[in-house]
Structure formats: structure tokens, C-alpha cells
């Protein structure tokens, strides 16, 4: 998948190609600053390798684009912003070790990033221990801003509850009440499965069974055989990244798309771009989509990203990185401080301006649990899907309408005295 052979990466000579070795990367501002100006450093931990590498690369694209814009507008507190990027290999262990390096050696002021939910949870705990702001860009498990919420952690992407609630009613009414689940065996998959099951039982449906597949599974044949034998109305695929690519390709090879509906919670451009025509199918939830006619600033954002990526449209991951970096800068400037507690207080309830929100309605970080309230974009892959028109948004659902309250999600926020 040719996601980031982009001019923006080449143009920033210090964004190094040593991803596999975990080499730290530095994005320098494009304006001239006085030699005495100490930079504000944002440490970004995202996968450049592993199952979720394409998603991580696009989050980095969005963040680097935001840093350019921030610096052109005067940086943070009149100081240049530098983005230091580390590869977590899509895993929690490397994520924490890279965070330790960024804090101890590189002296970053704030942390952001992650795609793997287990990495998000680990970094959230690390940030709490260091009393440092961490914004989870792309790890979805409910408990990050739910039962394991911390005052230091915010999240830009949606929760797993939002992803499942975004399309549950449509799937249940359209395809039937008997579902079989193929579940990635870690925090993200477990949370999605739990959330769908709550809604399925409440609606009077039933689970025909479920199979747990390890992260990085390449052969899904045993799980697909079990799914076929269960004869469900719907096969719910809860994988993401390369795992979902492999699963959908093999499901079509097994002919399951002719025997049952195929659907799931999260779907992303990174996955759809990697699929052959025959496997472009299903009903899903997007968290952001590049084609939003009539929504201010979206077309300009798409044009700007395409210039950086050789014609590739932005994905939800691009927007996660972009919105998160801008939000950190806005909060620090509003707080007139780099102190994490003061920046946290500035972020609580902060609404993104339209040129950063890039979607309808109010987009903000909820004060009670630090969860972004934006929109869900449920829909389906059309039969004539071709890049970049790979998805048809059926409706735009405000997150506020489907999100659990902070109390219902189990968040009990405590702050340092």
C-alpha cells in the first residue's frame, strides 16, 4: 500500500527512513525563528510497521501538516513546534519504551498517537505516572476514556461503543438478528464484541457464535469454516488494518458473501484501498470521510492533503493526527502555559474551529471524560466502488446522540491536588 511516499515526508529531511529501527523523527518548522527560541516538543508514537502501519502513517501525515500550519501562525506561545515521531510496531510494549525515550531523552512537552488500543491504554497509564498530557489519536477501546480514564488522557477517535451504536440498528433491521462474530483477541476487539452483544441482546437478537483471532492473523480459514457452519444472518468482522484486509479477501474466497451479509463496526479507507474489487463490500461505520459536500473547509483540506501524498485523499486517520496536533496547540496557547494540568483544563470542553473540525456540528472534547464528541458516518461499500469513492455515507450521526455518558462509561476523573 503506497500511502506515504509523499512529498511532505521527503521535504522534511529529518523525517528519517529508519522506521523499522524505531529512529526518532523530527519535523522542523518551516519559518525562521530566533536562535534563542526553545522549541515546544510533541512526541508522537504511532505504527510505521506492523499490522496498523498504513493507519499510523496517515496519522503522521495529518500531524505534520498541522505542525506546519501551527508554525506558520506563530507556533505555541511564540515558540516553534517540533514533532518527534517514534514507531511502536503496532504493539503496546514498544509504545511504552518509545514514550520513555521521548520523555527522558528528548524532553517532550506532550504526547499523542497510537492505533492499537492496548498501546493507547499503556500510554495513558504512562502519561498519568509522568503527569503529562497524552491525546490518544486512534485507539478505540471504551475504557481509555471510560473505566480507565485519567486526567492526563484525551481521545480524538471514537469509542468502540460509538462505532457499534453507529450502525447496529441498520444491520439488525436490514439483515437479521442472528450474528456470528470474528473478534481480534485484544482490547479493541473485546470491547467491540461486548458493545455489539449488549445491543444485540437488548434488541432480541442472538449470537450464533464467535471466534477469537490473534492480532496479526493471516489465515482465517478455521474461523470462516466455523462461521459458515453457524449459518448466521450476518458475519460481523471486527478486525482492522491488515487483519481486516486478509479476513475480507478470504471470506469472499470462501463464498460467504453469497451466504450471509458481511458487516462490522469500524471501516477505513486504508483497508478499502488494499482490497481487490471482489472483496469491496459490506456495511460499516466510518469516523470521518473525505467527501462531505457543502461542509466548509473540507474540500480545501482534501486538496492540501492530496498535494502532500501524490493525489491520495485524506482518511479518518489523517484527520485524527491533524485535529489532535491543532487541539494541543490551541489548548496550550489558550492556557498560556506548557504545564500539562493547565493545558488539560483548557482542552476540557474546547470546541474545534470549523477549519479543524472538518465536519458538521459542534466538535469538542467532553469535559467529563475527555472524549471527543464528533460524528459517526455509517454506510456501505457501493457495488461500483472505485478509488477514491469507496464508501457511501448513509447518514451522519452526532456522537452526542449515541455516546454513553461519562458516568455510564465508568469514568471517574480525579486530578492532582
Image (cartoon, rainbow, N blue to C red):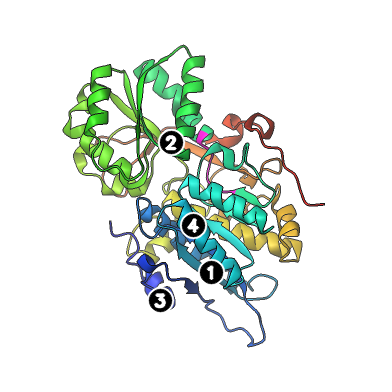
What residue would you read off at disc 1? 83
Closer to the camera: disc 4 or disc 2? 4
Magenta residue span:
155-160
Residue at 40%, 23% (x, y): give it: 171
Disc on the earlier residue, 1 or 2: 1
Front of the two marks 2 and 3:
2
**Horizontal and vertical percent for residue 220?**
25, 36
Q: Residue 6: where, in percent of width, then height?
A: 35, 67
Which element type, helix, strand or loop, lies under badge 3?
helix
Q: Quadrant of the N terminus?
A: bottom left
Q: Tell me how many marks there are.
A: 4
- Which residue is tagged 4? 95
Q: Are marks 2 and 3 in contact (CB under 8 Å)?
A: no
Q: Distance from label 2 to label 3 (Cα)?
A: 37 Å
Give the main secondary structure, helix, strand or loop, of the magenta stretch: loop
Label 1 vs label 4: CA separation? 16 Å
Reading the chain from its start, which is encountered first: label 2 or label 3? 3
Q: CA distance from mark 4 to mark 2?
A: 19 Å
Quarter of image, res 16: bottom left
Location of residue 321 in the rendering, given as x and y in whole percent from the top left corner = 50, 57
- Circles 1 and 2 in contact, beta carbons < 8 Å: no
Q: Report helix, strand or loop for mark 1.
A: strand
Judge whether 296 appears above or below 16 on screen: above
Tell me which label, 1 or 4, sits earlier in the chain.
1
Q: Which residue is mark 3?
A: 11
Which residue carries the number 2 mark? 189
Residue for point 47% across, 45% down: 288
Asked if one can make out residue 340 in the rendered structure from this viewpoint, the answer is yes
Mark 1 near mark 4, Cβ–Cβ under 8 Å? no
The image quarter in which residue 34 lies: bottom right
Q: Give the distance between the C-alpha atoms of the residues marked 3 and 1, in whole angstroms.
A: 15 Å
Amino acid at each position: 500500500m503506497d500511502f506515504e511516499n509523499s512529498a511532505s515526508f521527503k521535504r522534511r529531511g529529518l523525517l528519517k527512513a529508519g522506521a523499522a529501527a524505531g529512529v526518532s523523527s523530527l519535523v522542523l518548522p518551516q519559518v525562521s525563528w530566533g536562535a534563542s527560541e526553545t522549541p515546544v516538543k510533541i512526541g508522537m508514537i504511532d505504527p510505521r510497521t506492523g499490522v496498523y502501519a498504513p493507519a499510523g502513517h496517515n496519522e503522521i501525515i495529518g500531524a505534520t501538516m498541522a505542525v506546519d500550519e501551527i508554525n506558520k501562525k506563530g507556533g505555541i506561545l511564540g515558540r516553534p513546534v517540533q514533532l518527534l515521531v517514534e514507531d511502536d510496531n503496532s504493539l503496546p510494549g514498544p509504545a511504552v519504551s518509545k514514550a520513555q525515550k521521548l520523555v527522558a531523552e528528548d524532553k517532550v512537552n506532550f504526547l499523542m498517537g497510537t492505533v492499537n488500543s492496548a498501546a493507547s491504554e499503556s500510554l495513558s497509564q504512562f502519561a498519568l505516572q509522568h503527569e503529562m498530557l497524552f491525546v490518544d489519536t486512534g485507539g478505540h477501546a471504551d475504557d481509555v476514556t471510560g473505566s480507565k480514564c485519567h486526567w492526563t488522557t484525551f481521545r480524538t477517535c471514537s469509542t468502540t461503543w460509538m462505532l457499534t451504536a453507529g450502525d447496529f440498528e441498520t444491520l439488525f433491521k436490514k439483515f437479521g438478528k442472528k450474528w456470528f462474530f470474528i473478534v481480534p483477541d485484544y482490547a479493541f476487539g473485546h470491547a467491540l464484541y461486548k458493545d455489539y452483544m449488549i445491543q444485540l441482546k437488548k434488541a432480541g437478537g442472538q449470537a450464533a457464535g464467535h471466534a477469537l483471532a490473534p492480532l496479526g492473523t493471516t489465515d482465517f480459514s478455521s474461523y470462516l469454516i466455523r462461521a459458515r457452519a453457524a449459518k448466521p444472518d450476518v458475519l460481523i468482522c471486527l478486525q482492522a488494518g491488515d487483519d481486516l484486509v486478509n479476513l475480507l479477501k478470504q471470506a469472499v474466497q470462501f463464498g460467504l458473501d453469497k451466504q450471509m451479509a458481511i458487516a462490522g463496526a469500524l471501516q477505513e479507507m486504508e483497508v478499502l484501498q488494499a482490497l481487490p474489487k471482489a472483496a469491496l463490500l459490506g456495511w460499516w461505520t466510518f469516523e470521518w470521510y473525505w467527501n462531505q459536500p457543502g461542509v466548509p473547509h473540507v474540500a480545501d483540506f482534501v486538496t492540501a492533503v492530496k498535494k502532500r501524498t501524490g493525489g491520495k485523499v485524506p482518511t479518518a486517520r489523517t484527520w485524527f493526527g491533524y485535529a489532535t496536533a491543532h487541539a494541543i496547540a490551541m489548548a496550550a496557547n489558550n492556557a498560556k502555559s506548557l504545564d500539562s494540568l493547565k493545558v488539560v483544563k483548557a482542552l476540557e470542553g474546547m470546541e474545534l474551529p470549523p477549519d479543524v473540525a472538518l465536519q458538521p456540528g459542534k466538535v469538542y472534547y467532553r469535559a467529563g471524560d475527555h472524549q471527543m464528541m464528533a460524528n459517526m458516518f455509517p454506510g456501505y461499500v457501493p457495488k461500483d466502488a472505485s478509488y477514491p469513492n469507496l464508501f457511501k455515507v448513509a447518514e451522519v450521526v452526532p456522537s452526542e446522540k449515541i455516546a454513553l455518558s461519562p458516568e455510564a462509561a465508568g469514568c471517574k476523573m480525579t486530578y492532582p491536588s
